[in-house]
Image (cartoon, rainbow, N blue to C red):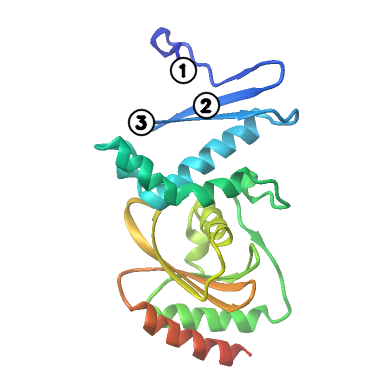
């Protein structure tokens, strides 16, 4: 980064015990990662930097990161990203963060659940919905599959990074599709480790959608 004035691009460096990599996003935010793991590659660390920045955009929006008016306020706001960022730093069994693709699962009752999900998403005035089992997608609406792969992965990752809750209503920004205008991110727990996820607009209210969840649950059961 210090050679940029000389038109020299240096993206990574190694010492005897540490691998250092950095990346500048939108000429505004510079992220740096240090790893002491022997198998840490430029690719994996580069993916980590991308995922961390996209996580920041998802929670705060691109405008908040590129037009910083108050650095102390930004530091405070970034705390809301910590759980999601920490989840990328933890070792796990999933490779979705490296491939930036969601992981899927197949079940015999998938067709029935797909029909229920479509009906529920329509009632919630949403075209973007999926049914999660753990960190895997069981079924999803057609428009959900039109999301950019890193965005879909990030939304699933967000659900798994949060503490279990019967329902959630959060604002999120899509890093590629809508980095400056937020969507409502709704989640509903049907049973432990199974949740419905929706992206929608300002309507309907969370309570109205929650009532539809009860109807969906008994219909699918």
Rendered-image quadrant of the C terminus = bottom right
Name the residue: 69% across, 28% down: 36
Name the residue: 36% across, 45% down: 76
Instruction: Say which mark, if any, is on residue 1.
Output: 1
Would you say the residues marked 1 and 2 are in contact, meaning their CB atoms lie under 8 Å apart?
Answer: yes
Q: Which residue is mark 2?
A: 22
Q: Which percent across, then down, holds residue 103?
A: 66, 59
Secondary structure type for disc 2: strand
Instruction: Say which mark, if any, is on residue 28.
Output: 3
Secondary structure type for disc 3: loop
Dot 3 or dot 2, earlier in sequence: 2
In the picture, measured across the screen, residue 134 lies left or right of residue 216, that is right
2 and 110: which one is in front? Answer: 2
Q: Is residue 32 above or below residue 148?
A: above
Q: Which percent across, then down, holds residue 212?
A: 45, 86
Task: Answer yes or no: is residue 175 visible.
Answer: no
């Amino acid at each position: 980064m210090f050679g940029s004035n000389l038109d020299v691009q240096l993206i990574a460096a190694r010492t005897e015990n540490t691998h250092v990599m950095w990346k500048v996003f939108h000429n505004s935010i510079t992220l740096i990662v240090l790893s002491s793991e022997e198998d840490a590659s430029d690719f994996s660390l580069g993916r980590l930097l991308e995922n961390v920045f996209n996580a920041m955009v998802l929670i705060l929006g691109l405008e908040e990161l590129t037009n910083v008016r108050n650095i102390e306020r930004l530091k405070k706001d970034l705390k809301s990203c910590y759980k999601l960022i920490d989840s990328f730093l933890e070792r796990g069994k999933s490779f979705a963060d490296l491939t930036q693709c969601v992981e899927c699962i197949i079940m015999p009752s998938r067709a029935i659940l797909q029909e229920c999900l479509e009906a529920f998403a329509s009632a919630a005035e949403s075209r973007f919905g999926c049914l999660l089992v753990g960190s895997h997608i069981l079924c999803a609406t057609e428009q959900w599959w039109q999301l950019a792969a890193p965005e879909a992965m990030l939304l699933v990752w967000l659900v798994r990074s949060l503490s279990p809750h019967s329902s959630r209503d959060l604002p999120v920004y899509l890093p590629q599709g809508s980095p400056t205008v937020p969507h409502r991110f709704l989640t509903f727990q049907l049973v432990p480790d199974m949740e419905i996820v929706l992206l929608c607009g300002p309507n309907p209210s969370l309570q109205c959608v929650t009532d539809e969840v009860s109807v969906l649950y008994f219909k699918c059961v």
